[in-house]
Image (cartoon, grey):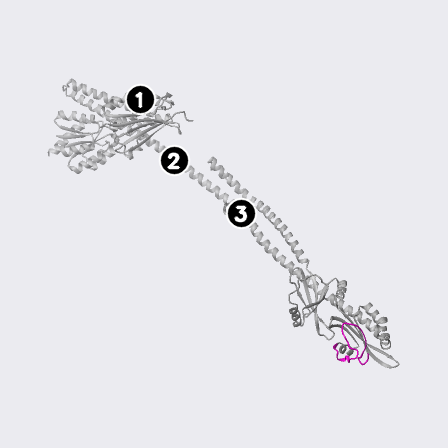
Amino acid sequence: MKRFKDFSIRTKLNIAFIISEALIGTFTLFFTYIMIIKGLDRIENYYLETELNSVKHSIDNELEVLSRNVKDNAYSDDLYNYATSRSEAWVKLNVADWITRNFKVDLILILDAKNKLIYQCGNFEEFPMNKDLSKHPLIKKIVEFPEVKGLYFTSKGPAYVVSSQIVHTDESGPRNGTYLYGKLMDNARLERIKGLTGIDLSLINKGEIISSTIVKYVDRPQNLDNIYNELKSKKFQEFNIYKPNYQSAFIYSILKDIEDKDIGMLEIIRPRKTIPLVTGFFIQSSIWIFIFAILAIVITIFLVTGFILRPLNVFKKIIEEIQKTKNILQRVTVETRDEIGVLANEFNAMLDALNKSQNELIETQQNLIKAEKMSALAELAIGTVHQINNPLSIVMGRVQMLQRLIIYKTFIPQPDLEKDLKIMEIQTKRAIDITNSLLRYATPMAFRFEKCDINELVKDTLSLINKQLEEDSINVVENLKTDLPFVEYCDPHQMRDVFMNIITNARQAMPGGGKLEISTDYDKKEDEACIKFTDNGCGIVPEHINKLFTPFFSTRADGTGLGLAISYNILKGHRGRIEVESEFGVGSTFTVKLPVGRRS
Amino acid sequence: MKMLIVDDEIEICNIFYDFFTPKGHEVIKATSGEGALEKVKTEKPDLVFLDIRMPKMDGIEALKQIKTIDKSMTVIMVTVLTDEETAKKAIKLGAYDYVTKPLSFDYLEKAALLVELYTKK
């Protein structure tokens, strides 16, 4: 799983910007949405209020039309005359039916001056003909005023009630009476209002719906009584708006009758189509806004990071090139003066410093090498002096002695003279050997390579020294690999010298006799022939191991200290190597490793 | 006079032997520092010729040891020219003198004579 810090700067910036955009975007869109919804809510409220007013206006209009008609009738006394003079059936057939048909009136009352009912047509309220009606609240109200129009809650529900006093005089004297039309606010009436205004409405009384234009189920507020009581308690508020869900909105207003008593509530129902519509559209456009915003961010970051990353890539290229070519003279060229520009300058300054210190280092190193070479040369010279000095001292000593004897004319017996000369010969030869070895060490070696059987070479060498080994009672164990491959490039004479040197060293390490094991092997992985010489002699002290191959290092007085140094050079010429393992007092192992094929 | 010659090169010892024996000196040979110490203890020589450059125990170390055995022992260091600094250091440690290789018999004669005179007093 890739961790955040492992991402590229570009990805990191993208992630950071997209997250912040998502947060800001969500926040902004959320608030915009809330504002739009609130606005729509207010508009909805405004419409509800307007619709309420339209409905109220329609009701007023209906009342006005009825009122005008009842007044017309009141001024022409035909109906009144007919009601008093003709039979009730005649009036109903010729007048009342016509009125009810044309004005959809449910009740027609005609009262005389003494408020005695002289004619009744219609059935929504029973007015007994013989009874004094002046106690009836409706009659009480209408006879008080020349004309009345308004609503009245009857036993069959709310109804329009309009009345007009009859002001007419004939020969029998002034006679006053009252006309009254009643019209039930039934479903048909409400439908008419809906037809005019396009608004759905209902009438509610005591929590029950008396009539409504809505036939289908509507999810109204649960407790209509509460709304009613609330409306009553708020004296200054004419209406209450309820929005129980996103399907419908309701506005309630109290209906008053002609006596200014509450007769119920008018309910207007408005479908809420806008909010779900707007929400849907909003979500759709939000998704697009988000997509475009993210695209814009990605493009912007791509461009911005390009500005940042381009100089960084220049940087990277230069660093890579420096790593590859090790050339620290290169410089980063960043033209911007921002942080990266500063960094580039600092980097260049660091390269300058590095270059300077590297040059110093090279100089110091060269000086050191020079000093080392000088000291190596000096050591070689000192070594040579020491090695040659001894035999020369011996020769010189003998010569001086003989000179003295001659000067003092002393008799020198023949055997003494012979002995002295023999010593001088040996020591001079020894000095020549040393200088020859030195020459051999110092001059480049000439190799005569041929294909060699290493086992044969080992056997050859042993045959040369076997006698001495036997004399020193050294037991030689040969452990030669039978199918050892021939070494392609090998100088047999030089290699024999190497083996001889190692065997001689082993012999000298075991003055009291011992065991020398010589084994050969083939290392397939390295393609090398390994020749191992193991003795159980005195071993080498650890501090001497590092000096073994330096010229003139010897622990023996008569050793030149050049044997292993020369062997080392011979093996170097063969692209081989020599390794030593030794434990002081236990023994040593010298391993010669020779490449079988020529190495490139 | 009894003298001890210490040199890892036996032929050097032999020269000393062949030179001093005819002159009536007793010459003992040792080819290592360890051998020298042994001989110093057992033979108690009057004069020691001690080679500085020897494997294992070198002349300086042997000198220190000899001086702990017998502080008055006369020791002449034998060295090559390049070892002169070491030889001077040896004198500070109590060596009587030093002689450089190749050996000068005139010097050896004088030194033996001086030591003989010095030890007789």
Q: Nearer the viewer, mark 2 or mark 1?
A: 1
Mark 3, residue position: A12
Decide if residue A497 is on the left or right side of residue B21: right
- Residue A429: percent from left, percent from top: 25, 21
- Residue A567: percent from left, percent from top: 32, 26
Name the amino acid, label 3.
Lys
If you read the primary sequence from the N terminus, does the residue marked by circle 2 or circle 1 appear first?
Answer: 2
The residue depicted at 50 percent of the width and 43 percent of the height is A344
Hey, which residue is sitting farthest top in the picture? A414
Decide if residue B118 is on the left or right side of residue B56: left
Crowd band around label 3 with a 10 angstrom C-alpha radius: few (<14), some (14–19), many (20+): some
Crowd band around label 1 with a 10 angstrom C-alpha radius: few (<14), some (14–19), many (20+): some
Image height of A251 relative to A510, above or below: below
Question: A148 or A349: nearer the eye?
Answer: A148
User: Can the viewer see residue A438 in this picture?
Assistant: no
The quadrant where residue A557 appears: top left
Decide if residue B119 is on the left or right side of residue A32: left
Q: What separation in Å lies between label 3 and label 1 (alpha carbons)?
A: 74 Å
Task: Read off the magenta span.
Answer: A112-137
The quadrant where residue A579 appears: top left
Q: Circle 1 sits in a helix, a strand or a loop, which is it?
A: helix
- Residue A35: percent from left, percent from top: 63, 59
Decide if residue A115 is on the left or right side of residue A577: right
Q: What separation in Å lies between label 2 and label 3 (alpha carbons)?
A: 47 Å
Mark 2, residue position: A365
Mark 1, residue position: A459
Name the amino acid, label 2.
Gln
Q: Nearer the viewer, mark 3 or mark 1?
A: 1
If you read the primary sequence from the N terminus, does the residue marked by circle 2 or circle 3 appear first?
Answer: 3
